[in-house]
Image (tube, rainbow, N blue to C red):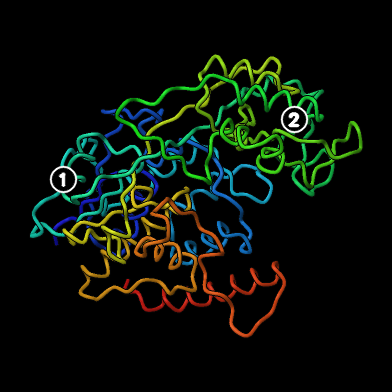
Amino acid sequence: MPPIKVIGGGLAGCEAAWQIASRGIPVHLYEMRPLHRSPAHRTGDLAELVCSNSLKSNRVDRAGGLLKAELKLAGSLLIRLAEEASIPGGSSLCVDRLEYARLVTKSIEDNGNITVFRDEITSLPSDPSEGPAIIATGPLTSDALAADIERLLGEGALAFYDAISPTIEAGSIDWKKVFIQDRYGDQETGSYVNCPLQKEEYLTLVESLRTGGTVSPHHFEEENLFEACLPVEVLASRGDRTLAFGPMRPVGLSDPGTGRRPYAVVQLRPENRGRTLFGMVGFQTKLRQPEQERIFRMIPGLERAVFERLGSIHRNTFINAPALLDQFQRACSAPWLSFAGQITGVEGYVESIAGGAMSGIYTAWEILGNTPCPPPEFTMIGALLGRLSSTPRGGFQPVNAQFGLLPPLEGQRLGKAARKEAMAERALKHMRAYLADIPS
């Protein structure tokens, strides 16, 4: 049988290629790096993470945790390798970025059914007789390929800014002014470094964020920020206490120096196993680089911070999926072409892996002579991808996994925690039944 083309070697593309290859079907995986760099990537490895190093909570009563649990049932390569490359992160699955990318690259390149081509694809496969192809080029799809996607779909791809948080060298942190503790964990234990702020320090920081100079958009880019990933300065502009109830919330923390909960905190999360680098949690930004250094050094403990990487912004292109893709992530106008990952409008690492997994499973299902069907709506994967084929009110914006996507429980009146646990149990039961019917 002819190889299936998968274009894009990010999370979704690698997972799609793996799901197809694991069913004995040959795959040609195309990745333009390192020959052609993107504005955000730093290496030529596959599946390089460019924003956070966290794949969200491991708890199944959290949306990200449930999504990962379903993917593990589906034999996800990317989730298994994330666990191998994990570093302490409280209840979250955090990874050493470089190790994770190396593990994924080696697993894909060592697979006998996958051939990796380091080449930029500038136009979509146009001959359906060559078999199906999967486009998983992510939010940084090259200009040439993006233009061809627009030509095919007949409706402009949308764009919004995706902001990256700064990374700080551990040796530059003033450890006397910070404390290590996970939320609701024992004092002085945990993975997160907490920079505590008193009220006046917090308000001064908020005002500086509001007035800091930001990077101006290019004339051809329309700013359309995703509500779940807003730059920290945008949150600051929404009110004095917005950050204190958002990424700087102090709940579940107690400063051992005072014995009390701080007014606000800036949390730092380890970026690698050696804990030599720490990322600023929730501090994605489009501030100019000199402004970042000036403002972020106002945070207690970061007065002499050395930034291994400052925050930045980049274009994030995604398709108006409800109007242009079917329930299997195939282009309505060219059903031999599937799209997977962030380019379809899912937002988040695990969500991208889920999109890639299902696109690969659907494609393999058809190649093996079967009619695919989507996962049940009771599963997080089914609910998430189902959102892509339905038109929400107010237009389409990228979507994260969330329990609000799942159908409510029938005939049960439970508290919030018990309700999520019951919904997670129901989801995993339906996912096991669904996977039992997939040809392998």
Q: Horizontal and vertical percent for residue 95?
A: 55, 42
Q: Is residue 39 left or right of residue 230?
A: left
Q: Are marks 2 and 1 in contact (CB under 8 Å)?
A: no
Few, some or many residues within 10 Å of mark 1 (<14, 14–19, 20+): few
Q: Is residue 190 visible?
A: yes
Q: Quadrant of residue 359?
A: bottom left
Q: Quadrant of the C terminus?
A: bottom left
Label disc, if present, on residue 411 of the rendered structure: none
Q: Secondary structure at mark 1?
A: helix
Number of callouts in the render?
2
Q: Position of residue 235 (x, y in %)?
A: 60, 36
Farthest residue, direction bottom: 411
Which image quadrant for residue 425?
A: bottom right
**Residue type indicated by callout 2:** Cys
Mark number displayed over residue 195:
2
Q: Say if 243 sits above or below 299 in the image.
A: below
Q: Earlier in the sequence, mark 2 or mark 1?
A: 1
Residue type, mark 1 in image: Arg
The residue depicted at 43 percent of the width and 74 percent of the height is 376
Q: Which residue is mark 1?
A: 151
Mark 2, secondary structure of its residue: strand
Distance CA(mark 2)–CA(mark 1): 49 Å
Identify which residue, 421 or 367, lies in the foreground: 421
Which residue is rendered at x = 67% and y = 51% of the image? 91
Instruction: Point out residue 355 in the picture as x, y percentages from the top left corner.
Output: 38, 57
41 to 156, vertically: above or below: above
* Nearer the camera: disc 2 or disc 1: 1
The residue under the point 42% across, 23% down is 216
Label 2, residues with CA under 10 Å away: few <14, some 14-19, many ≥20 = many
- The N terminus, quarter of image: bottom left
Left or right of 46 in this view: 81 = right
